[in-house]
Image: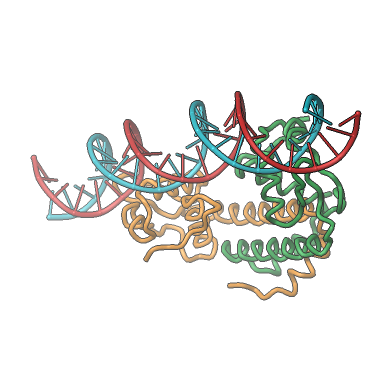
Chain colours: A green, B orange, C cyan, D red
Amino acid sequence: MTQHFTRDKPIYSQLVDIICGDILKGNLQPGDKMLSVREYSLEVGVNVNTVQRVYKELEMMGLTDTKRGQGTFITTEEGRIQHLREDMKVELVTQFIQSIAAFGFSKEEIIQILQRKEESK
Amino acid sequence: MTQHFTRDKPIYSQLVDIICGDILKGNLQPGDKMLSVREYSLEVGVNVNTVQRVYKELEMMGLTDTKRGQGTFITTEEGRIQHLREDMKVELVTQFIQSIAAFGFSKEEIIQILQRKEESK
DNA sequence: ATTAGTGTACTATATAACTAATACACTAAT
DNA sequence: ATTAGTGTATTAGTTATATAGTACACTAAT
């Protein structure tokens, strides 16, 4: 079950994004035990150290709790998840607005296209 | 006049973006002579080779014409610029939609925020 | 006490991306 | 022919990323 990665971004970073997405979408619920670093490294076909870095990032973001010897678990403090959700939203939108301004598009012009687009699920 | 760059993206790439923006916004007009690689390298405080890479990219994108010994000029084929404009627009929106889907946001939710945001110029 | 499963730390290596320094080559004007 | 201004090529060094291998440390179950 190897994953496909883009080359414009480090693998560990893409994995963080994927897991964040799974948490925000509820695929990973508070309290859920995550795969061990070794299991997950096999699952996605990367080195253990890469996964370790992913898990470290997630813990620094406050999204996971690591219990040495037991495993890594999705945080049960749902406030943190909601917080992440809001932060993500704002950051995404802010960056997007910066981009469209940098390239000389108007907000209205963009919203128009956005509304016409199919929702990609 | 040194520029400030972010560290999550190569300098050359940021410079390409800036120049693309200037072209799309009309700050750089078709036929305009660009700064020489050496001038521009001083202007933004990076190495000549970095600028060279920027100019190479721009030429590959069809946005500039390079005349060895004379300089680099904004293309006079305005169709290319319009083409770039459309491509940029679609790409920006597409990537954005992918992101918001990956993190589990709905399009409507995002458009709402987008509309409330100030236009950042 | 032992064992299996977990996260963690460390060192080393390979590779690619990025940047830098320097030298080369073309063009136009004098 | 020379010179100043241009783009181009080559080589080298730095950094980030990813990987590999190995060893360590904690926990729970037996």
Q: Residue at x 86, y 53 (%)?
A: A30
| Of residues B25 and A39, the one drawn nearer to the viewer in this rendering | A39
| Of residues B105 and C24, the one drawn nearer to the viewer in this rendering | B105
Percent of width and height locating residue A31 = 86, 51
Image quarter (top left, top right, bottom left or bottom right) of the C terminus of chain B: bottom right
Percent of width and height locating residue B116 = 74, 75
Tell me: residue B9, above or below residue A5: below
Percent of width and height locating residue D13 = 35, 39
In the picture provided, is D24 more to the left or to the right than A121? left
Tell me: residue B13, above or below residue A110: above
In the picture provided, is A86 more to the left or to the right than B12? right
Image quarter (top left, top right, bottom left or bottom right) of the N terminus of chain B: bottom left
| Of residues A6 and A116, the one drawn nearer to the viewer in this rendering | A6
> Residue B74 lies in what quarter of the image?
bottom left
Percent of width and height locating residue B106 = 83, 59
Q: Residue at x 67, y 48 (%)?
A: A56
| Of residues A90 and A48, the one drawn nearer to the viewer in this rendering | A48
